Image (tube, rainbow, N blue to C red):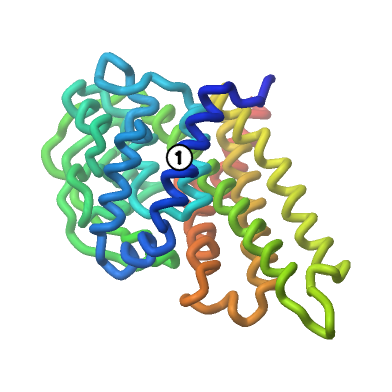
């Protein structure tokens, strides 16, 4: 397989990084966590103009007709910058599930949508903010009504309990939709892990103890090197799943990205010392996000079990 990005893909990634870097995503995430969704929805609209919401929606429905590779590029950027909102639901899961052209057009235009799909995803992320709230029961897709809210370990992930309403349609592609959601989540984890590693390396080059930078100590170098290796091993699995999103490839990508990002969060917390535990420190945005995303759209145990079934069948 060839994992080198094309010129168009590289340009797309660069444009997203520039947009997000100039949008103060840390302030956006903190506002979203505090209940002020205005800055987050404004950023959502700018990303929709870049085509993020429309990536895997067919051109016939107003989308871009791109491949899952472009989806992983976008979601890695979202994870690296800690962007809040139901992006997986709006730009990955529902585009892989919905067949109604009118609804697909709304998604492509940037409608904020979310979905509950038990048992893996029993709650609707940001259900109180979304314009479109749906419920998937097996292969039956219904409208949904938000009933109440729940807290998450990640303050930017506002969960909602929902009740199914009027049936919209039955679908023949729930597995594909779940796989696109898991792949997008894996890419988010990869981006978050890269951000944690980058911030940790920057910090250990500045923090001095006993007259020298703590990054000069071998014990810290080894831990950061382990994170670098874990992320480098996860990346080709995510890229490979983007090129050929089989269930086996997606599950392998999700497990590997979750493990690498979790290691990055643990090492990042350790090298930052006591300040790493504080909500006021920006590192907490990515630490808590990784903690939540590890279990989102299938826990590592779920995906390992599916890998085992695929390998022995």
Is there any visible trace of residue 246 in the rendered image? no
Mark 1, residue position: 16
Outermost residue to the left: 166
Q: Is residue 52 above or below residue 145?
A: above
The residue nearer to you, when weighing 230 against 177, is: 230
Image quarter in which the C terminus is found: top right
Left or right placement of residue 137 versus residue 8 in this view? left
Residue 172 placement, left or right of 274:
left
Q: Closer to the camera, 110 or 130?
A: 110
Q: Is residue 112 left or right of residue 26?
A: left
Residue 269 image offset from top left, x and y in percent: 64, 70
**Residue that lies at the very extreme toward the bottom in this rendered image:** 210
Q: What element carries label 1?
A: helix
Residue that appears at 15% across and 51% down: 145
Residue at the spot x=67%, y=78% of the render?
Answer: 273
Q: Is residue 291 above or below residue 121?
A: below
Q: Can residue 261 be seen in this view?
A: yes
- Farthest residue to the right: give it: 218
Q: Quadrant of the N terminus?
A: top right
Residue drawn at 56 percent across, 33 percent down: 250
Residue 206 or 153: which is nearer the viewer?
206
Percent x, y of residue 149: 25, 64
Relative image position of residue 285 (x, y in whole percent): 48, 64
């Amino acid at each position: 397989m060839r994992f080198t990005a094309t010129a168009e893909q590289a340009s797309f990634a660069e444009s997203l990084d520039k947009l997000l870097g100039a949008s103060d995503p840390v302030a956006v995430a903190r506002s979203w966590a505090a209940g002020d969704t205005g800055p987050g929805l404004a950023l959502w609209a700018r990303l929709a103009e870049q085509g993020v919401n429309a990536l895997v929606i067919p051109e016939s429905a107003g989308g871009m007709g791109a491949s899952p590779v472009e989806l992983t590029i976008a979601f890695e950027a979202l994870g690296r910058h800690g962007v809040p909102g139901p992006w997986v639901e709006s730009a990955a899961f529902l585009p892989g599930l919905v067949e109604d052209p009118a609804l697909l057009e709304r998604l492509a235009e940037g409608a904020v949508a979310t979905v509950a799909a038990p048992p893996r995803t029993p709650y609707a992320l940001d259900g109180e903010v979304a314009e479109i709230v749906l419920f998937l029961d097996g292969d039956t897709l219904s409208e949904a009504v938000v009933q109440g809210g729940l807290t998450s370990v990640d303050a930017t992930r506002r969960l909602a309990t929902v009740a199914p309403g009027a049936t919209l349609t039955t679908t023949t592609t729930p597995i594909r939709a779940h796989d696109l959601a898991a792949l997008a989540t894996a890419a988010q984890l990869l981006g978050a892990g890269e951000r944690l590693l980058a911030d940790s390396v920057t910090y250990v080059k500045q923090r001095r103890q006993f007259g020298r930078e703590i990054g000069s100590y071998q014990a810290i170098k080894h831990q950061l090197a382990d994170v670098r290796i874990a992320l480098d091993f996860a990346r080709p699995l995510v890229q490979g799943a983007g090129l050929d999103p089989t269930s086996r490839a997606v599950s392998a990508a999700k497990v590997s990205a979750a493990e690498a990002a979790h290691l990055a969060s643990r090492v990042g917390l350790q090298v930052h010392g006591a300040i790493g535990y504080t909500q006021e420190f920006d590192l907490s945005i990515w630490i808590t996000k990784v903690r939540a995303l590890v279990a989102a759209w299938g826990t590592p145990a779920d995906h390992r079990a599916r890998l085992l079934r695929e390998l022995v069948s």
